Amino acid sequence: MIFGCFSLQAQQTNSPVVQTTSGKVKGITEGGISVFKGIPYAAPPVGEFRWRPPQPVKPWVGIFDANKYGSNCAQGGWGAAAGTIQEGSSEDCLYLNLWLPARAEDYAKLPVMVWIHGGGFTGGSGTGLSGNAFAKQGVILMTFNYRLGRLGHFAFPALTKEHPDEPKGSYAFMDMIAALQWVKENIAAFGGDPDNVTIFGQSAGGVAVHSLLTIPRARGLFHKAISQSGGGRDGVLTGRPISKDNVDALYPVSAETIGVNFARKHGIEGTDEAALAKLRALSVEEIVDGGRENDGQGGPRIYSGPVLDGKLVVETAESAYKAGRQAKVPLIIGNCSAEIGGNFVNSSNSKEELFSLFGKLQDEAEAAYDPAEDKEFAEVQTLFNTDWAWAEPARFTARAFVGCQTPVYVYQFGYVPDSMKNWMRYGAGHGAEIAYVFNNLDARWGASEATAEDGKVAEILNTYWANFAKTGNPNVNDLPLWPLYSIKNEEILDVELNGKVVGKQDPRKARLDVAEKAFKSRNKIQSRGGI
């Protein structure tokens, strides 16, 4: 396969060795793709370094055999028994993985894509998704792990006072910045261009993209961004104030208060250095605590999510976008057509109850969401959840970037393969696009026996994403035109239910318009949320 001036037919070794700033690493080459797994990008965040910024890797002597994934970051759920963490996860977890064309270092600088996994900031990992398709497109793909749950986001009064020169709260974001710093310092040795890095992520990973776009310490570490189902407005994993002195209506309980709640759950009283030492002495299983976010049903909150500390995270993305303070880089943003149902945003039990929350906008909401008055409540609720948490915030973000003369491309992914139509009744669900973006249809939501149509959609999306990483424009001559977004025309790329890919005016406009108006009374409508 030939891409530009790169040829996968070049002479290659089955065990390429590359010199990094910490030492030599050895990968594996198969089928024209070189893969390096489990490279440490920071020291293990354990012991005294629990709830500290990532520390430098201790250089090694000899050659590090990068042929297997490192441990995932400690997490509960998904099969973990009570009092345990998921098998294969550990507090020692700051590792990254690379996929690149064989002997990429022999060629010109390759664009780099850095994937930020989702999982609500409490689960997931950088393993499990192959980067082979991106490598075949002439792109280096990097995935990595970052600290999760209370190990990734935590605040406590004594912790705030400790090491006053260090940022606090969102250690997951510090890990992401450290991984990007590793790319800046090392990717050229693998044939990559440190000045052409695209970050992209889905769900919590898409939220993280918004955070990195607006965290000053991340500036200059990436040059393009893609947020898949990541929202863009306040209220969904977007920054809880660290102190009780600056809580707000969306986050009325401070991160420090939540940390104190967690300490008390484990019999630790006080907020001084001795209490912090006891917290650091807890086992990783006790910290993960089964992934619980409250101390019993209806009990005090014991997990904060991302923290607005004023040093690292200085403001929310919505605040930054309104003021034009985000990184001015090309952006792709969008979501799936029917992200999630149930009581994700609010606990309404009927269409009438849901529409009544719109107040004076009730008639407009009914006309937008149920014009023929024939939709099931579950469908209306799914569309509302989708618009409130993802679609309208994505449009808000796109408009903010357009206002700063920054190119933006907006999409909606609505394709549902035949094998999923009985399950995804109202459109493509949360995460449905991932396997297509990676052109890896055996991944989550991918068909076990992909049809020709499935493969066509995957090839198109993977090519759009790769070309955006190369040039800042997803379009190539042989694909349907993806219109540049403008406030006047509001054109998006719509991947329709049947797999047709077409650029057109946003078909959700009426719904998004009423959702935008309703954000002024968001506290009434939004009773819960998270991705």
Image: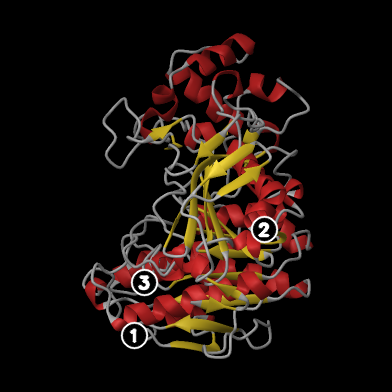
Q: Are marks 3 and 2 in contact (CB under 8 Å)?
A: no
Crowd band around label 3 with a 10 angstrom C-alpha radius: few (<14), some (14–19), many (20+): many
Q: Which residue is mark 3?
A: 428
Query: x%, y% of residue 145?
Result: 51, 43
Query: x%, y% of residue 510?
Result: 52, 82
Q: Farthest residue in the front direction?
A: 11
Please identify, in this view, whether the residue under mark 3 or under mark 2 is nearer the observer.
3
In this rendering, position of residue 500 left or right of residue 110 = left
Q: Earlier in the sequence, mark 1 or mark 3?
A: 3
Residue type, numbered disc 3: Ala
Q: Farthest residue in the top direction?
A: 274
In this rendering, position of residue 56 left or right of residue 516 = right
Residue type, numbered disc 1: Asn
Crowd band around label 1 with a 10 angstrom C-alpha radius: few (<14), some (14–19), many (20+): few
Q: Earlier in the sequence, mark 1 or mark 2?
A: 2
Residue type, numbered disc 2: Glu
Q: Say which element carries label 1.
A: loop
- The correct choice, above or below, for 470 with respect to 42 in the image is below
Please identify, in this view, whether the residue under mark 1 or under mark 2 is nearer the observer.
1
Q: Are marks 1 and 3 in contact (CB under 8 Å)?
A: no
In this rendering, position of residue 423 left or right of residue 13 = left
Q: Residue at x 21, y 72 (%)?
A: 422
Q: Earlier in the sequence, mark 3 or mark 2?
A: 2
Q: Quadrant of residue 450?
A: bottom left
Q: Which residue is mark 1?
A: 498
Q: Which residue is mark 2?
A: 318
Q: Say which element carries label 3.
A: loop
Query: x%, y% of residue 72?
Result: 43, 39
In this rendering, position of residue 225 left or right of residue 102 = right
